Structures are given as structure tokens and as C-alpha cells.
Image (spheres, rainbow, N blue to C red):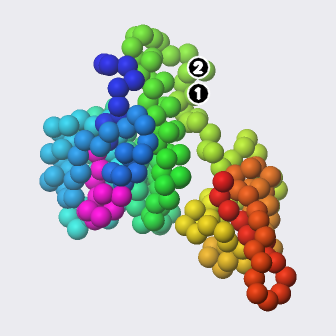
Amino acid sequence: MIMNQAIEVLIIEDDLRIAEIQRRFLEQIKGFQTIGIAADYAEAKSLIDILKPDLILLDVYFPDMNGCDLLKEIKQLDKQTDVIMITAAREIETVQEAITIGVFDFIIKPVVFERFKQSLKRYEDHYRKLEAIRSENKIMGQEEVDKLLYKQQDIYEKPMLPKGIDKLTLIKVMEVLDAGQGLTAETVAKQIGVSRTTARRYLEHLISEEKIAADLSYGTIGRPERVYILK
């Protein structure tokens, strides 16, 4: 094994436009290399067998298969190959099944680059830790096991979020801001389906965490509005 070589990624996605977006996202993250794209079951199985990727980016919905079924096969064939689900599937049963089988992460479409990058960097940290342990033929201690079980902490949270701040809503707010720069609390509230007061609470929390900034927008009528911008 060559230490610190690029992590080889196989994309399994039947929508080739989305697959291309994922490939371009990967190009922007140091330490990763796309080694193939598969659009159906036969192609996926063939490329997995031939290329033996370190990481697979996998959708759930395909005309000829279910991604969770393929995930089971992957885990049975090679437990060292990891999978990040990237899908429009939101059903609790699907999410729970993927987690139970052993998916590394679960990203809901449409994919925001920052969330994608966060997941890949967490995976790289996990991969490099295992790589170092294997290279030393080392027997793992409890601390090392804990570090692998409790993966690098999500960038959107601290050990304990403040009262009234929910992690999933916080991620939604960040995704909305990433899609449209310079938004008011009212606009954010409408897009994620919460009250203006709730949206402002989350936005002000993100300012306190220095993840976003605020400015004033001077319209032609009425008072200036406070707008929020990703840093």
C-alpha cells in the first residue's frame, strides 16, 4: 500500500448529468480521484470487481436495481470498500436500512458542494487513520476504535448545540444560503418552511459561529433589510 495516495472513487449514478457534477466536485477536493462511472447494475458490478475502489458514491433509485441491495452486495464482497449514499430518497426506512448495512454517510439531493466536501474530508480522515494502522500492522486500542466509531465531528455542530437549534434545520439554512447569496430572514424562512423568527434565530446563531456574515440592503422603499451571506 502506498501511503497517502489518492483515494479512488467509483460513482454509481444512472443520471449522467448528476454523475458528471459529482466528478467535478471530486476534482475540487484534494486527495480523491474518480476512477469510473457506472449507470446500471451490470456496469456497477463489473467496475467494482475490476477497479476495486476505496469509496463508492451510490444512488438508491435505478431502473434495474435498488441501491441498498447493491450496498449489501458490496459489503459482503469487500468490507474494505466504503459507500456514501447520494440520493433523493428520504424515506426513514431507506435511511435506516442504509445506516444498518454500513453506509459511511447519507447525502440527500440536490447536493450542495460544501456538504459534499464535508463528507469527503471526514471520509479521508477515517481512511488515513485506517491506512496508518494497517501500515504498522498495529493492534488497535480502545482509543483508536473510538476514533473510528465516532467519526470526525460534523462541521455544523459542537458537542452540544444551543437550545432551540436543530442540526438538520441548521444544515437546511446553510444549503439555502449556499444556493442564493444575500438572502433575508423572510426568504430563508419561506424556502425551508419555518417562521421568520425561527429563521432569524438560526441565522444569528450562524453569525455567532462565524460561518455567515450579515449586511444591510437598501431598497427603494421602506427600511433597509438585513441580508445574510455565506463567508
Three-letter amino acid code at the position of disc 2: Gln
Q: Residue 119, position in %: x, y?
A: 50, 45
Badge 1 amino acid? Asp
Asked whether residue 6 appears in the rendered view, the answer is yes
Residue nearest the viewer, comparing 219 with 148: 219
- Residue sitting at 37 percent across and 38 percent down? 32
Residue at numbered disc 1: 146
Left or right: residue 18 compared with residue 199: left
Q: x, y (%) of residue 155?
A: 63, 45
The range drawn in magenta is 10-21
Asked if 51 appears above or below 71 in the picture, the reply is above
Residue 148: percent from the left, percent from the top?
A: 53, 30
Residue 19 magenta: yes
Are circles 1 and 2 on residues that touch, CB within 8 Å? yes
Residue 185, given in percent of the width and then of the height, sits at: 74, 73
**Which secondary structure, mark 1?**
helix
Q: Is residue 1 left or right of residue 40?
A: right
Q: Which mark is residue 32?
A: none
- Which residue corresponds to the image point at 50% horizontal and 59% vertical from the top-left? 112
Classify 223 as above or below 37. below
**Residue depicted at x 40% and y 51%:** 25
* CA gap, disc 1 and disc 2: 6 Å
Q: Give the labeled residue for mark 2.
A: 142
